[in-house]
Amino acid sequence: MTGFKNIVATLYLKDGKAVKSPTDFTEFEDVYALCQLYNDSGIDKIIIFDLSTDDDEHEKNIHTIENINRNIDVKVCAGGNINRIEDVKKLLYAGCLQVIFNATKDSSLSLANEASERFGKDRILMSISNVDYIFKHQEEIEDTFHELLVLNIDIIDALENLTSTPYVVYMPDNGLDKICDVLKRETVRGIAGAFINDPANDIMDLKTTLSERGILVDNFTPDLKWEDLKLNSDGMVPVIVQDYKNEEVLMLAYMNEEAFNVTINSGRMTYWSRSRNELWTKGLTSGHLQYVKSLTADCDYDTILAKVSQVGAACHTGNRSCFFNNIVKKEFVEKNPLRVLETVYNDIVDRKNNPKEGSYTNELLDKGLDEILKKLGEESTEIVIAAKNSDKDDLKFEISDFMYNCMILMVEKNITWEEIANELAQR
């Protein structure tokens, strides 16, 4: 089997919060911060186990999973407390790429088969800890499941004799040699384990080491080398740093060859401090790290554009960006679609927080949800009429009216454009 080997984190949810294990319900401080760290630090996939014991807790955990998926880019698979096809649908609608079934539950195979036929085999996984189940259901498993999560590393030899279904294996931290041996197996798609879940462990460092040992993993392999870049008189290259989500320019710094190589190997932005004359990993002291999303050279190969996931503030002053001192500013009409939508949305938020007499927005907000929904119904009808009349200008006007009123509903329900964009991106 070809392709990258995955480094997989496992996360356990209890009452909507992350806990250390299925038997240790000690909570992590912030499940979203933990998942953001996984997202930025080299994890390829997150498998989430719902440890709920009733429907209310199950719904709470699904809500947490949905919020996790809204804020990260890494693939997420989830399972636990799946008793009906509706549970599968909820997890997929919550943004999960795949759903994982538990082989120890008697109802799992028939339900998984139904889910596989309805949503596609590539969306369905199974966790397993003994080969008896594989032996009894070999053909059905190969027809139903895209991948297995093997929870007992001792069964992998027997497993491979029974099925060619690829698998991720949960393994103890028993040394790099063992990890490499396992990852070199043809049907192994990746590894999971408590040592991978530990936020203190450096996943990019592990990936670099695995690459050096001939394991194909998804890490930074540069298309350009340092020698391809044109250096300034100090032997360095300026780096413009930009937020990868909203494209805000955050700062400017410089790299020498050492900083360039450390950045690529570690996945964290590292520069050369000209004032201190030393290597400088951004945020190592303050915690305001910059995780690399992309590095791009300009047309002359003498400047690097870095798109990063910024933790906290980029500027030493505490500002998000170093660029906040106005020199000149000319008023202009913003036409970037997302920024226009965000600006209008923010204006509606401001109207809600600071009501203005005579404001249409405040009048509609004051009348409440039913009136907002009634207005949306009226505007959607106007769109249909304008479209049937084939009047393009009229149609643009009615769509704009509808979107404005839809944004009033979004503000009323505390739904942001970022959440909508994330939802669309998953479709």
Image: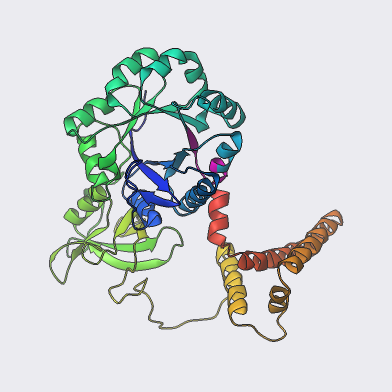
Vertical side of 338 occupied by 93: above or below = above
**Magenta span contains residue 235:** no
Q: Where residue 166 appears, x then y in whole percent? A: 39, 24
- Residue shown at the point (72%, 85%) measured from the top left: 358
Q: In which quarter of the view is residue 209 placed? A: top left
- Residue shown at the point (38%, 50%) measured from the top left: 18
Question: In the visual, does 347 lie left or right of 277?
Answer: right
Q: Where residue 210 appears, x then y in whole percent? A: 23, 35
**Which residues fall within the magenta stretch?**
91-100
Q: Is residue 141 visible?
A: yes
Q: Where residue 387 appears, x then y in whole percent? A: 82, 55
Question: In the visual, does 404 lie left or right of 4?
Answer: right
Between 157 and 281, the one nearer to me in the picture: 157
Vertical side of 406 occupied by 171: above or below = above
Task: Identify the residue at the far left of this view.
Answer: 277
Q: In which quarter of the view is residue 222 placed? A: top left
Between 93 and 286, the one nearer to me in the picture: 93
Quarter of the figure that contains the C terminus: top right
Task: Identify the residue at the far front of this view.
Answer: 54
Question: In the visual, does 210 lie left or right of 339?
Answer: left
Quarter of the figure that contains the N terminus: top left
